[in-house]
Amino acid sequence: MLKENIKQLRKSKGLSQEELAIKLNVVRQTISKWEQGLSVPDSEMLVSIAEVLETPVSTLLGENISEAKVDDLKAISEKLEIINLQLLKRNDARRKMIHCILISLCAIIMIIFISLFLLNSPYFNWDYNNPENVVLGVAFHSFEWLFIRIAPIIFIVSIVGIVLTRKKV
């Protein structure tokens, strides 16, 4: 309902997404996401949208003016609470996904480090007179050289990310 109402009211006022975005001090993609239902504006932004489109917030949220309840603020707050709970669930799912990805990245880095340690750099013992061994040895050496220098930084950043994305009790 909200997404259709924003789009319909914007068009009825003759505003493009870009023009509405400028009036609300947001980027055009934000307006597009609202109109596609990919995200919803917070309560303060709903009030701003209603002011720019010269319509009550209850109309944005799907109520007709003739159907307005006596206690409009209560109805609006209930709808906003539902919207905020939906956003909270979506953000929590995104946080969990990022947390799992970071844990997996740390595990992969540790597995590669252990593998390199156990292999004890076998490319040193290869016969570099054989062209196949030369290419493979140089490739392995390049990977190992880059990995040993970059992986610790990625690992530390991932640990920090895991700490920051863990669920607070």
Image: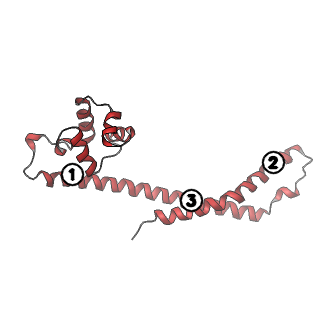
The residue at the far right in this view is: 129
* Identity, as a three-letter code, of the amino acid under mark 1: Lys
What residue is pinned by disc 3? 104
The residue carrying pointer 3 sits among few (fewer than 14), some (14 to 19) or many (20 or more) residues within 10 Å by Cα, namely: few
Task: Give whichever of discs 3 and 1 has the lower sequence position.
Answer: 1
Residue 96, picture quadrant: bottom left
Q: Position of residue 153 (x, y in %)?
A: 63, 60
Q: Do the residues labelled 1 and 2 touch (CB within 8 Å)?
A: no
What residue is pinned by disc 1? 79
Identify the residue shown where x is 38% and y is 37%: 28
Which residue is at the front of the view, 50 or 155?
A: 50
Q: Where is residue 3 in the image (x, y as percent from the top left)?
A: 28, 39
Apparent side of residue 36 relative to residue 63 in the rendered image (left or right): right
Numbered disc in front, either 3 or 1: 1
Residue 149 appearing in the image: yes
Identify the residue shown where x is 21% and y is 51%: 79
